[in-house]
Each structure stands twice: as structure tokens, then as C-alpha cells.
């Protein structure tokens, strides 16, 4: 009994910070502004020069789009470690099909990504395997296929695809995807169901939601979204190797946490988590090499920043095992 009382006191102490939710919601934005100010000072203003801002923007399109699918999965309380491998494999498919028609290549990439997402969703929902276990396994599976296919060399897209690598087009495509994602998350039944499942799957089921079907569909959607992001990736790089998309899943997960997305998802998930988190991560990736030339120091500083952000923004009220 005494141990239980002590534990409850510790939990209440840990939750004091969460008694003002609006403060926690503002922290990611304040963190982004603070990082911009600090690194602007440390780099002598280089980080806010037009050429560096343009470079940050050029590195933002693919992870920003791909993060939308993972955001939906995490909102429902799951995880996905396979998005980087899906990006690599769908990029190869786009390169192949682009030899026939560009529009057909885009459709093929989206369809292939949806199939891979369905593969993840099937094993997670049908066989009741934890999402992080399923996606770690498929991460290695899809990555192995990428490396096998590219054994004899990179897979190149047509010149017509590379010619589309225009800033205005990438901004337009990214903007359209963001607007669609925002509308779906804020104004459709799917967005409400995702938050309900993340907050409590049993309660969501009794309220009329179908958690199994919803979770399967968001894995399919996440794969399809990443398949579309692959088209922008192919436009940018022109040819695909076995390492395409490597570490993308880690970048996305860290970016979403930096943006304030609760690890367990639920009602506190906000679409702004995607935008703020991805931008924060991109700025850090560009700024750290300017201040710390040694790679080991960059990793150390990055780890400290990420740990501090997680400690400040994590939703302790809804901590539980990830499904």
C-alpha cells in the first residue's frame, strides 16, 4: 500500500508540467524559434542566408510528405520503421516505369507503396503482431530487395523525369499533399477515428469505430503517400541505389517527436506536429555541421537536443505500450 501511494505521488509530480496543456502545445514552436535564433548566432547568420534556406527547403519535400503517413499511424498508437525502405523500393519501380510514361510511373509508385503498406497492415491487424516488430521486419525485407535489384548498379530514371526537378513544381506537389492531409485529418471521420483509437482502442470500438479496418487502411495510405514522395525523390536524384531512403524512418520519427506528437498518439496529436517537427529537424541537420565540424560531436549534440525535447513534450498521462 505504501509503495502504491509513493508511486502515485511520483506520477503526480511528473504530471505537474502537463497541468497546463497549452504550454506543452506551444513548446515545439518555441523550440523551433529558439533553435533558429541560437544557430543564427552560432553560425554568424549563415543559416538564414537565402542559399542555405533554399538548401533546407530542398531537403524538406520528401520527409515532409512521407511523415504524413507515419503521423497517422502514430496518432492511432502505432509505429512504422519501414518507410525508408518503402521509399527506396518504390523509387526503383518509378524509375523502371518512367521508361514508358511519367504519369504511369507516378501511379505505379503509389500503387506499389500501397501494397507494401497493406503488407504491414495485414500482419499487424490480422496476426496481432506489434506494429514496431512487423515494420522492423519489413524494413529489412524491403531494403534487401532494394540492394538485390541494384546489385549491378543504380537504376536510372528517364531524362524527362529529371527535367521536372523544378522548385516550383516540388512546392506545388508538396503543398497539395499537405492540404489534402490536413483536410482529411481535421474534417473527416478518419481523423476522428485515428485520435479515438490512439486514446483508447476499446472505447473507440464501443463508439462505433472499427479499429482493425482503420489501422489497416492507414498503413495502406502511409505506403501510398511514401510512394508519391518517391516520385519527388527520383526527380531530385535521377538514379536509385540500394541505400535510397536509408534512415528516413528514423528522421521521420524524430521529426514528429520534435514537433510535439505524443509517442502514444491520441487526441493531443496535431497536424502542426508534422510541419514544425520536419522543419526543426531539417534546420538542425543543416546547422550542426556549420558549428561542429566533427561528426561525433554533431551526433552528441543532436542526441542531447532530442532527449531534452522528448523529456519536455512527452505525454506522461497516456504512456503505455505501443501497439
Image (cartoon, rainbow, N blue to C red):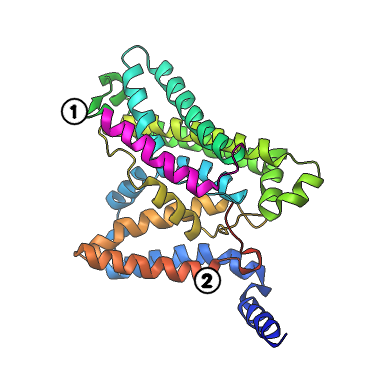
**In which quarter of the view is residue 192 placed?**
top right
> Is residue 130 shown in magenta?
yes
Q: Quadrant of the N terminus?
A: bottom right
**Which sits in the foreground, 141 or 306?**
141
> Is residue 16 shown in magenta?
no
Q: Residue furthest top?
A: 100
The image shows residue 221 at horizontal and vertical percentages of: 55, 34
Q: Which residues are magenta?
A: 126-148
Main SS, magenta region, reads helix
Residue 206 visible within the image: yes
Label 1, residues with CA under 10 Å away: few <14, some 14-19, many ≥20: few
Q: How many marks?
A: 2
The image shows residue 280 at horizontal and vertical percentages of: 42, 57
On the rendered structure, is 146 left or right of 174? left
**In which quarter of the view is residue 317 placed?**
bottom right
Where is 316 relative to 78, above or below?
Answer: below
The residue positioned 36% from the left and 23% from the top of the image is: 94
The residue positioned 81% from the left and 46% from the top of the image is: 206
Q: Secondary structure at mark 2?
A: helix
The image shows residue 86 at horizontal and vertical percentages of: 41, 35
The image shows residue 118 at horizontal and vertical percentages of: 54, 31
| Residue identifier under label 2 | 312
The residue positioned 71% from the left and 84% from the top of the image is: 5
Where is 304 relative to 73, above or below?
Answer: below
| Residue identifier under label 1 | 153
Q: Nearer the viewer, mark 2 or mark 1?
A: 1
Amino acid at each position: 500500500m505504501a509503495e502504491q501511494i509513493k508511486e502515485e505521488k511520483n506520477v503526480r509530480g511528473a504530471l505537474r508540467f502537463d497541468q497546463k496543456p497549452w504550454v506543452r502545445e506551444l513548446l515545439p514552436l518555441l523550440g523551433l524559434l529558439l533553435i533558429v535564433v541560437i544557430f543564427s548566432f552560432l553560425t554568424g547568420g549563415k543559416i538564414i542566408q537565402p542559399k542555405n534556406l533554399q538548401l533546407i527547403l530542398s531537403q524538406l519535400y520528401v520527409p515532409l510528405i512521407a511523415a504524413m503517413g507515419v503521423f497517422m499511424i502514430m496518432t492511432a498508437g502505432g509505429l512504422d520503421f519501414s518507410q525508408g525502405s518503402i521509399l527506396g523500393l518504390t523509387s526503383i519501380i518509378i524509375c523502371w516505369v518512367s521508361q514508358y510514361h511519367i504519369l504511369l510511373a507516378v501511379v505505379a509508385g503509389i500503387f506499389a507503396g500501397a501494397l507494401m503498406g497493406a503488407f504491414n497492415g495485414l500482419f499487424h491487424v490480422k496476426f496481432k503482431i506489434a506494429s514496431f516488430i512487423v515494420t522492423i521486419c519489413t524494413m529489412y525485407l524491403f531494403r534487401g530487395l532494394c540492394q538485390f535489384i541494384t546489385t549491378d548498379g543504380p537504376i536510372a530514371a528517364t531524362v524527362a523525369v529529371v527535367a521536372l526537378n523544378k522548385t516550383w513544381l516540388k512546392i506545388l506537389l508538396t503543398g497539395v499533399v499537405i492540404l489534402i492531409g490536413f483536410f482529411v485529418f481535421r474534417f473527416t471521420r478518419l481523423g476522428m477515428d485515428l485520435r479515438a483509437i490512439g486514446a483508447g482502442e476499446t472505447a473507440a470500438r464501443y463508439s462505433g469505430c472499427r479499429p482493425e479496418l482503420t489501422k489497416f487502411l492507414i498503413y495502406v495510405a502511409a505506403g501510398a503517400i511514401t510512394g508519391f514522395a518517391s516520385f519527388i525523390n527520383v526527380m531530385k536524384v535521377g538514379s536509385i541505389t540500394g541505400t535510397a531512403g536509408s534512415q528516413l524512418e528514423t528522421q521521420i520519427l524524430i521529426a514528429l517527436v520534435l514537433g510535439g506528437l505524443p509517442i502514444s498518439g491520441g487526441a493531443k496529436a496535431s497536424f502542426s506536429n508534422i510541419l514544425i517537427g520536419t522543419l526543426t529537424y531539417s534546420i538542425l541537420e543543416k546547422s550542426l555541421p556549420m558549428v561542429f565540424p566533427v561528426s561525433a560531436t554533431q551526433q552528441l549534440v543532436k542526441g542531447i537536443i532530442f532527449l531534452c525535447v522528448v523529456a519536455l513534450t512527452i505525454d506522461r498521462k497516456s504512456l503505455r505500450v505501443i501497439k
